[in-house]
Amino acid sequence: MSTAPAELSRGVRRITLDAAGIPLSALLCEPAEGPPRATVIAVHGAGMNAGYFDGQALPELSLLTLGARLGFTVLAVDRPGYGQSAAVLPEGQTVTEQAATLAAAVRDFAIRQPTGAGLFLLAHSFGGKVALLTAADHATPDLLGLEISGCGHRYAPDAFTGEGASRGGRRSWGPLRLYPPNTFTTCASIVGPVPAREQVDIVRWPEVFRGAAGRVRLPVRFTFAEHEPWWRYDRDALAELRSRLTAAPSVQVDRQPGAGHNISLGYAARPYHLRCLGFFEDCLVRRTVTHR
């Protein structure tokens, strides 16, 4: 991965988390005044890093600064095999191992920092797989909701063959008009190779999802971009997706117009992030009403 330090939005700082002995680098942005309403843990996709959630092509792209302005602490974590942990995990980890490592990192953060009313997971692409397994197997009472974009449970028919086989490059992003013109210049420091152990796990996801989905006991929201190339999101696929999440108190599915796979780097980033934070606000209300 690129070693050049990425530019950060104002108020965003770098920290290191202790994930049971594994150092995970992360980006943190906190509300300027008062304690946080809650904390959003943002989990990036394959071939990216935490800077995905602090897009620099336009000021309004950053989830970190938007969340902080609305009273949330936002912590974007470099997954195992990315950022600082790449030195000790050069081949990365499997998705199951990453879920355990992420859970350990979140526990470390919660010990050291105020988290408000609870925690939310907001994850993209491969990060959605890690977040779902974290919610399934490492959930704690303060984990209140899960938002996943760019990740479903059934790959598109050509995801790994023909035209789909080329989607590891820019074609996987969707139409380039959906992104600011300087996107591929400003995001040079946030893209890099996919660790080997993670790469192997990509094709296994439909099987892993079937085994884990029924253990998720949180409100869940899936978002599919209008121009999502990797996943099936037709009516039958979405019905099956919902049917697998048998223990989740609610399952929402949304489509983000004017967006490609990497929603948080495109023009649609701000409306998408606002919808996510609105979902988290709904979860906070649900928690308040339930405990009265």
Image (tube, helix red, strand yellow):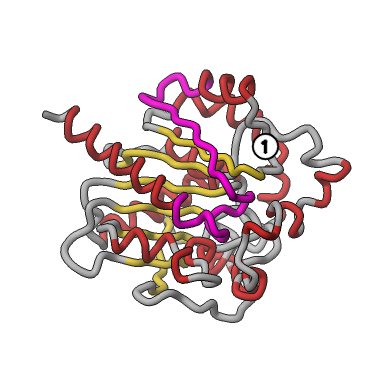
Q: Position of residue 117 (x, y in %)?
A: 21, 47
Residue 233 seen in render: yes
Q: Which residue is mark 1?
A: 231
Residue appearing at x 34%, y 74% in the figure? 11
Residue appearing at x 49%, y 48% in the figure? 123
| Nearer to us in this view, 249 or 261 | 261
Residue extending farthest to the left is 292
Quarter of the figure with the N terminus? bottom right
Type of the residue with mark 1: Trp
Residue appearing at x 59%, y 47% in the figure? 125
Judge left or right: residue 46 versus residue 156.
left
| Nearer to us in this view, 92 or 130 | 130
Residue appearing at x 23%, y 57% in the figure? 36
* Vertical side of 279 occupied by 239: above or below: above
Quadrant housing residue 141: top left
| Nearer to us in this view, 251 or 140 | 251
Q: Position of residue 99 (x, y in %)?
A: 50, 45
Quadrant housing residue 71: bottom left
Judge left or right: residue 222 versus residue 106.
right
Quarter of the figure with the C terminus? top left
Judge left or right: residue 93 versus residue 164.
left
Residue 23 seen in render: no
Judge left or right: residue 150 versus residue 132.
right
Q: Dot 1, crowdedness within 10 Å: few (<14), some or many (≥20)? A: many
* Vertical side of 145 occupied by 89: above or below: below
Q: Magenta residues?
A: 244-272
Does residue 214 belong to the magenta stretch?
A: no
